[in-house]
Image: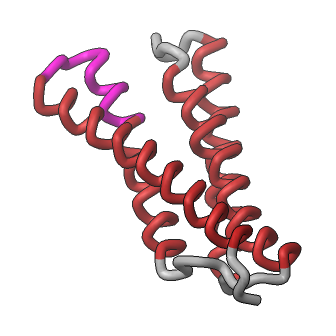
Amino acid sequence: MSFHYFRKFLWAALFYLVMSAVSGLINKTHLVDLDKFAQLHFQFLGFIAMLIYGLGYYLVPKLGKKDLRYPGFVPLHYWLGNLSLITMIICHSVMAVYSDMWLQNVLYISIAVQIALLLIFIVAIWKTLSSTKK
């Protein structure tokens, strides 16, 4: 994988770190009555997961001296991961005010996309590490 997508994952992670801090501040000052869903998901799926994905895709092949398996998946992972995370947080926040089955279904689809991306990441790293191709 090129350094290009490592930087994209890193910038996304830093963006989500800032968003986590802002949502935490909003929660603490009670400017808006929010639950902790947005803050926690910005922290864990945004900052931590994006950082791990970027480092995993970039450093694991370098340290293992192997080619990354399924390199075409990295851009798809980046874009789908960001889109589904933002969609998940927006849907959950809107559902606090306006509960609708359509929003709930979009929320569940976003969660399913995040889980699928995680599993595919694990398979890609596992296949890279177990590959005999250098």
Which residue sits furthest front? 132
Seen from the viewer's position, the closer of residues 113 and 96 is 113
Picture mark count? 0
Q: Is residue 72 above or below residue 56?
A: below
* Spot occupied by residue 51 in the image (x, y as percentages of width and height): 71, 54
Residue that appears at 41% across and 49% down: 116
Q: Which residues are magenta?
A: 89-100
Seen from the viewer's position, the closer of residues 53 and 94 is 53
* Spot occupied by residue 73 in the image (x, y as percentages of width and height): 48, 73
Residue that appears at 19% across and 19% down: 98
Which residue sits furthest right? 63
* Spot occupied by residue 87 in the image (x, y as percentages of width and height): 35, 44
The C terminus lies in quadrant: bottom right
Residue that appears at 26% across and 21% down: 95
Answer with left or right where residue 12 lies relative to residue 114: right
Seen from the viewer's position, the closer of residues 29 and 84 is 84
Q: How is the image coloured?
A: secondary structure
Residue 11 seen by the camera: no
* Quarter location, residue 48: top right
* Spot occupied by residue 115 in the image (x, y as percentages of width and height): 44, 43
* Quarter location, residue 101: top left
Residue 72 seen by the camera: yes
